[in-house]
Amino acid sequence: MKRILLTGAAGTLGSAMRKALVGWVDELVLSDIVPITELNKGESFVKCDLGDFASVVALVKGCDGIIHLGGVSVEGSFENIMNGNLKGGYHIYEAARQQSVKRIVFASSNHLTGFHSREERLDDKSPMRPDSLYGVSKGFGELVAQYYFDKFGIESALIRIGSCLPKPVNRRMLATWLSERDLANLIKRVFVVNRLGCTMMYGASNNPWSWWDNSHANFIGWQPQDSSAEFEEEVLRNDPLLRSDDPVLLYQGGVFATAGHFEDK
Amino acid sequence: MKRILLTGAAGTLGSAMRKALVGWVDELVLSDIVPITELNKGESFVKCDLGDFASVVALVKGCDGIIHLGGVSVEGSFENIMNGNLKGGYHIYEAARQQSVKRIVFASSNHLTGFHSREERLDDKSPMRPDSLYGVSKGFGELVAQYYFDKFGIESALIRIGSCLPKPVNRRMLATWLSERDLANLIKRVFVVNRLGCTMMYGASNNPWSWWDNSHANFIGWQPQDSSAEFEEEVLRNDPLLRSDDPVLLYQGGVFATAGHFEDK
Amino acid sequence: MKRILLTGAAGTLGSAMRKALVGWVDELVLSDIVPITELNKGESFVKCDLGDFASVVALVKGCDGIIHLGGVSVEGSFENIMNGNLKGGYHIYEAARQQSVKRIVFASSNHLTGFHSREERLDDKSPMRPDSLYGVSKGFGELVAQYYFDKFGIESALIRIGSCLPKPVNRRMLATWLSERDLANLIKRVFVVNRLGCTMMYGASNNPWSWWDNSHANFIGWQPQDSSAEFEEEVLRNDPLLRSDDPVLLYQGGVFATAGHFEDK
Amino acid sequence: MKRILLTGAAGTLGSAMRKALVGWVDELVLSDIVPITELNKGESFVKCDLGDFASVVALVKGCDGIIHLGGVSVEGSFENIMNGNLKGGYHIYEAARQQSVKRIVFASSNHLTGFHSREERLDDKSPMRPDSLYGVSKGFGELVAQYYFDKFGIESALIRIGSCLPKPVNRRMLATWLSERDLANLIKRVFVVNRLGCTMMYGASNNPWSWWDNSHANFIGWQPQDSSAEFEEEVLRNDPLLRSDDPVLLYQGGVFATAGHFEDK
Amino acid sequence: MKRILLTGAAGTLGSAMRKALVGWVDELVLSDIVPITELNKGESFVKCDLGDFASVVALVKGCDGIIHLGGVSVEGSFENIMNGNLKGGYHIYEAARQQSVKRIVFASSNHLTGFHSREERLDDKSPMRPDSLYGVSKGFGELVAQYYFDKFGIESALIRIGSCLPKPVNRRMLATWLSERDLANLIKRVFVVNRLGCTMMYGASNNPWSWWDNSHANFIGWQPQDSSAEFEEEVLRNDPLLRSDDPVLLYQGGVFATAGHFEDK
Amino acid sequence: MKRILLTGAAGTLGSAMRKALVGWVDELVLSDIVPITELNKGESFVKCDLGDFASVVALVKGCDGIIHLGGVSVEGSFENIMNGNLKGGYHIYEAARQQSVKRIVFASSNHLTGFHSREERLDDKSPMRPDSLYGVSKGFGELVAQYYFDKFGIESALIRIGSCLPKPVNRRMLATWLSERDLANLIKRVFVVNRLGCTMMYGASNNPWSWWDNSHANFIGWQPQDSSAEFEEEVLRNDPLLRSDDPVLLYQGGVFATAGHFEDK
C-alpha cells in the first residue's frame, strides 16, 4: 500500500487515527473541510468539501484505498446531514469507481442500530433501526457501499463504531467502547486481507459487557486487544445506577434515541 | 377516514390507484409535479414539488393519511434521485410529524433487494441489496420510515412493489406481478387495521412462481386475489427461454442489476 | 376408540364439544364440578373436583383417552387457579400414568403467549409470555405434559385455544377465532393419528388475519375449514378503529395483558 | 426441447412417466438395462448399463436434458448399489459434462432423510440422515450434482421422491404420496424455467398430512394439484392404528429405518 | 444497595453464598424454614415458611432486592414441591409487587431442560424440557417471573444453576459445574447493572466441556473465572467411562431423567 | 483403551499422528497399503488394501476403536477415489459393525465444503458443497458414518481437517491450519468422552482468521491450543496480496475449487 486517503482527518477520530497510523503507509493523504497545518512525515493535506463532486474526484485520484471518516458525526439538521453524509457518501463511492479505488473503510455508527434494546444481541442479520437522522444517513452510506460492491466490486469495511475515545467514561461505554488502538488495528487489517467483500463490523473492543457479535467477520482475523474491564470500577463509581425504567436505558443508542427531532432543540 | 393524500398521482401507478380507489374516502387529495386536470368526484389536486419542504407541509396539512407513490420511480442521476427520493422522502415524514399524520403507505421497490439471487426466498429478515441508485434511495426511505416510527410513532406500510401492471408481460413478472386490484386492496387494508406498526411487505400477487414471503405480515390480513398463473401460457409462449447463465437471470432485479452506472448510458 | 373422558363438560367449551362429538365414540364420559343432568346417548356423567386426586384416578380409570377442558378458564385468584389448574393439571397426568391412559388433549390458551406483540408471528419456537396468572397456569400444564411425555411416553396435543365461539365478535377475534367445528375436528384427528408426540398447536381457524403458524404440526394433517373472513365486514362495522397506541392493541392477549393483578379488581 | 433422455424407463416410475410425458418433446430417448420393446410415437430405446462409462457417454450424446430415474431404487447389497447408484450417478454427470448437457432431473429419495422423526418438518436446510445404503447412495448422487453445478454449471432438480404410486395405500403415504401427474408436471416445469440452479425438492403432492416444506423452491412455480385427502378415509379404514411407540412410526423412512443391514436378511 | 433478602439461607447453596457475600451489602436478611443461629456481621435472620403469604410479605418488606434460593431443591412429592416452589414462587413475586421490590435473583435449575440431549447446545431459545416435577416447578417459577416483568416491571435474573459445589466430582459436572465464586459474582453483577430485564442465564463456570450458551446475556457483563479444566484429570481418573448407550448419558439431567416417578421409590 | 487401529499410517498425516500418539494406548495397530518397517514400541503393522473387504474385517477384528485416516487424500480419478474412499469408507464401517467396534475417528476434509465463500462462517448446519470428487467422497463417508450411527449406534467424530502441517505456509492456512498437536488432542478426547454421538467438527487450530464454528461440539471439551497468529507475520511477508477478484480467493477450497475436472490435467 502506497497511498491511502483519510477523510475527516481534522476531527477527533481522524486525529487519533493519524497518530495511530504514523509510518504505516508511504503516503497518508489527509482531507478535511477544516485546514490541518501540522503534518507528520508521510502525510499530505488536501482541503475538500465532500459535497462537491469534482473536488472529491480530484482527492481520490491516485489513492490505493480510502479511510472515510468524514462527514457529519452527530445529529444535525437534515440539510447538513444531506450535504456531508448523503451527497458526501455517494461522492466518495462514485469517485472511487471512476478512479478505480477498490477498497474503502467506511465509518458507520452504532446509531444505525440505536433503537434496538440493550438486552438484545446484534449480529450481521439484525435489522437497521436508526435512532437519529444521523443514524439514517449512516444506513444510506452502508447501502451505497453494498451497491458499489455488488455492481462494481468495490470492497468495504462498514465499521459501526461504538465509542472511540481514550477510555470509557460512562456505563454505556462499558459496552460500546472501542479503543483507538483496536480501531487502528482493524483499519490496518482491512488492507492486509486478500479479500474483504462488503463486510459490516461492530466497532467495539473486547469488552465483557457487550451487545454485539462480530463472529460473521472472523475471516478478517481482527481480534481487539483492549477491554473496558480495566476501567469498570472507575466508571461504576462515577456513574450512578439509574432506575431501570429510565428511557435512556432502554435503547442502545442512549440519548440519541430519547432526544426529540433535531429542530426541537 | 376522511381525507387521504396520494402523491405521484399523475404517474402510471398513481393513475391506476385513483381508478381503483374511487369512492373509497371522502376526499382523495391528489398531488404531483405534473398537473392533473380531470378530477373524479371526491378528488382534489395540489401541484407540489416534493423537494420543497414548505410546499410539502402545506400539502400534508389536514390529511388523515398519506399514500406516497411520488418521487423518481426508475434509475436516474443521483441529483434527480436525491431531490425526489431523499429530500422528498424526508419531507413527507417530517411534514407528517409536524402535522400529526399518523399513517403512511410508502411505495418502496423490489429494486431495494434486486441483487439477491432468483433462487433465494426473501422475507422480512433478508438484508437490503439495492441494484441501483434508485434502489438505494428506497432503502433510505424505509430507514426514514423506521426512524419516524421508533421515535415518533408514525406507522408505515413499506410496500416493495414488484411489477404493478395490468398483466405480467415477461417471465420475470410471473414472479413479480402485482395486480392493481391487489395493491388497492392492500392500501385499503392499511387504513382498516387497528395497528400497523412499521411493516415491510413484498408487493406481489398470489403468483405460483414467487421469490417473496410475506407471512410475517399476516396480522394485517391482506390476501392477494390475483395470480400470474392465468397469464403463464401466454407469457411463456412470447418470452423465449434464455441460457441459464445469462447474467440478467441471476438477480431478482433483472436489467437493473446488470445495467452499469446511470451516467454510463 | 371406546371410551373418552371429557373434563369441564358443563362449561361453554365443554358443551359445544359435547354437541360436536355426538356419536363419535362408544362412550363419552363427562365430568365437571357442576352437575350435568341431560345426557345424550353414549354419554355418562361423573361429578369430580379435579383438586382431589383420588377422585381423578377413579374418573380416569378405564378411559382410552382424555379431553381435558376442565379447570379455571379465566383470570382468577391464585388459590382458585392453583386448585383447578396446577393441582388439577398434575392430577390428570399422574392419574393417566397410573391408569395407563396414553393420549390427552390439553386445552391450553393463547394467554400463555399473550404478552407477545400483535405484530409478531408465533410458532412452536416462540417463548412463553403469559399475560395473567391464568396464562402462567397453562404454561405449567404444558410443562407437566412435556414431562409426562419425555419420561413416560404419554402423548399430548397442547392446543392454545384462541377464541372458541360461534362467531368472532370483535376485531381481535378476526385473528383468534376458532370455530367449534374446527376444534372438534382437531380433537378427532388427535385420536386418529398413529403418533402424536407432545405437540403444541395454536387453536385458530383459517383466518386471513393471523398471528400464529402451525406448520410444525402439519404431520397431524389438521386443516381448519372455517375462516373469520366471512364475518369481517360485520365485525369491522360494529367494532370501531382504536388509536394504534391504545395499550390494548399492543399485545396479543388484549385486556388480559392490560388488566392489573387479579386482587386489584 | 427436442431430445430428452429418460433413464430407468422400464421401471415402475419410468413407465408411469413415459405415459405422462407422451407428446411432450420431439424425442424421448428411453434407456434401461432391461429391454423395452413397445415404443410410443416419439420414443426411442437404447439399452445401457449405467455402470459402463463409454455406454453412458454414447447414450447422453445429443440430448438436451436428462431425467435420471435409473439405478437401484430399493435397499440392496453395497455392490449393487455401488454399481447402479455410485458409478451410475457419477457416469451420468460426467457424461453430461463431456457432452454439454446442461439440465438434469435426478430422482433422489425420501430415504436420504429417513432417520428424521415423523414429528419433524424438513426443509432445504435439514441435514441428510439416510435410513439405508440406498439412502446413502442418493446422498452421494446429490453431492455429485452439487459439485457439477458449482464447478461446471450443470443445473439439477434433486427430487426426493416420496411414494409415487397411483394412490396412497397406507397411513405413511398420506404424508408421502406423490401423484404421477404431479411428478410429471414438476419434470416439465424443470425444463420450462429460465434458471434452475441446483435445487432440492421434496416430492410429495399437496397432502394435508405433510412432513416437508418446499417453499425455498417456489421460484420454480410448481404447485402440486393432487392430494392424499381424497383417499384418507379409505386408507384409515384399511390400515389400523398402531401403538405410538411402535418403532416403525418413529422415523420418516418407515421400514427402511427399522430394517437391519441388507445382508442380515 | 442497602438491604437484600436471601431465602433458603440455611441450605448448602445459601450457606455458600452467605460466605461469598460477606460485607457486600449493608444488611443481608437471611431467611429459611430452618433456624440459623450464627450470624455474621451485617446479617439478620427471619424464620419463614414460603408457603405462608402473610409471612412472605412481612419478610420482603423494606428489602431492596431478593436472592431467592429457597424452596425444594431436589425431586420430591408434588405436595412438597407445590408448597415450596409453586406457592413459594408465587408468594415471593406477589409480595415483591406489593412491597415494590424491583429486582430478584431466582435460582432456577438445569433440570428445567434436563431432557435435552447431551449433544445439544442450549441457548435462550431452547424449549423447556423438565426432567422431574422439580424441574417443572422451576419452569413455573420462570413463567411467574416473566409475567411479573411484562406486567409490573419487576426484573429477574433466572439462573439455571448447574452443579454449584466446591469442585466437580463426576464427569457430568465437567460440563455443569458452577463455582461458588462465579455464582456470587453473577449475583453481585445482577445488582450492579442499570437494566436487567427478565434474563435467563445458564449457571456454569467457564468449562471446556459445555452444553450451554449464555451469549444472549453478554450485556450483563458476567464472565465466569473458574473452569472445570483444573479438575479434569482427577475426575476422569475417578469416574470410569460408561457405555455410550447407558441411558444416564443420553440426557443433560442425568439421573433425574432416568429416575421414575417420585412415588415409585 | 487397549487397541486402536490407525489406517493410512504411512501417509504424512498418519506419520504425524504416530509420533503424537506414542504411548497413548496399549497397542496402536498401523495399517497402510504401503509397508511400514520401523515400528515404535506399542505399534504393530498390518498391510491392507481398504478396497478388499475381507482384509478390512481381519484388520478391524479385536480393535477397540479406529482412527481412519486412510484412503485417497487429494483429487484423483473417480476409479481411485471409488476404491479408496467409497469402497474403503463403506468397508471400514461395515467391518466395524460386524466386529462390534463402537467408536471411529473419520478424517473428513474441508474440501467437502470448499465451494462456500471465504466470507461465510460455517457451522454444523452449513450444507455440503464439495469442490472436487475427493470432497464428494468425503461427503459419502460422512453419510455412511451417520447411517451406521442412526441404525447401529456406532459413534463417529467426523473431522473436516483443514491444513494439518507443522506450520501454516500461505495466507489461506492462516484460517485453515490445524496443528498436529491439536489434532492429536482431539483424537485422544474422542476416546475419553462418555458419549460422542456422530459429531462433525471442523479441524482447525485456534486461529484468529477463521471460517468455522465448532460451538455445537463444545460438549466434547476440545480446546485447540495452537494458533496461526504466531506465524502470521512470516506468512504475510512471503505470500503476496492477490487481487480480491482472483477466483482462487472466492472459495474456501482454494485451488481445489478453481481446478477443472481431474482428467483435464
Image (spheres, coloured by chain):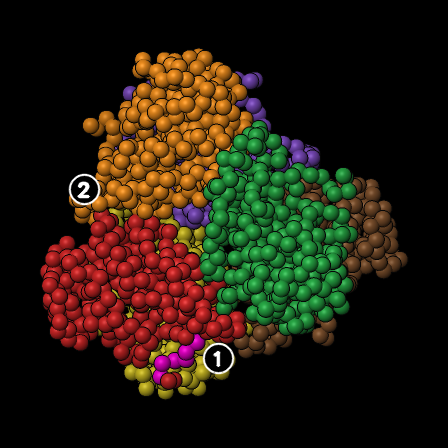
Chain colours: A yellow, B red, C orange, D green, E purple, F brown
The amino acid sitting under disc 1 is Val
Residue E215 in percent (x, y) is at: 46, 48
Relative vertical location of residue F250 with respect to residue F73 in this rendering, above or below = below
Query: Residue visible at 59% across and 48% down?
Result: D164
Relative vertical location of residue D224 with respect to residue B36 in this rendering, above or below = above
Left or right: where does residue D185 sit relative to residue F189? left
Marked residue chain, label 1: A
Residue B3 in percent (x, y) is at: 13, 59
The local secondary structure at tag 2 comes to loop
The amino acid sitting under disc 2 is Asp
Comparing labels 2 and 1, the label whose residue is closer to the camera: 2
Residue C239: assigned label: 2
As rendered, which of F182 and A82 lies closer to the eye? Answer: A82
Q: Are marks 2 and 1 on the same chain?
A: no
Relative vertical location of residue E67 with respect to residue F115 in this rendering, above or below = above
Name the residue at the right extreme: F37
Cα gap from disc 2 to disc 1, whole angstroms: 69 Å
Q: Quadrant of residue F99?
A: top right
The local secondary structure at tag 1 comes to loop
The residue segment tinted magenta is: B257-263
Marked residue chain, label 2: C
Query: Residue visible at 85% across and 48% down?
Result: F54
Residue on which the image places disc 1: A25
Left or right: where does residue F57 sit relative to residue C36? right
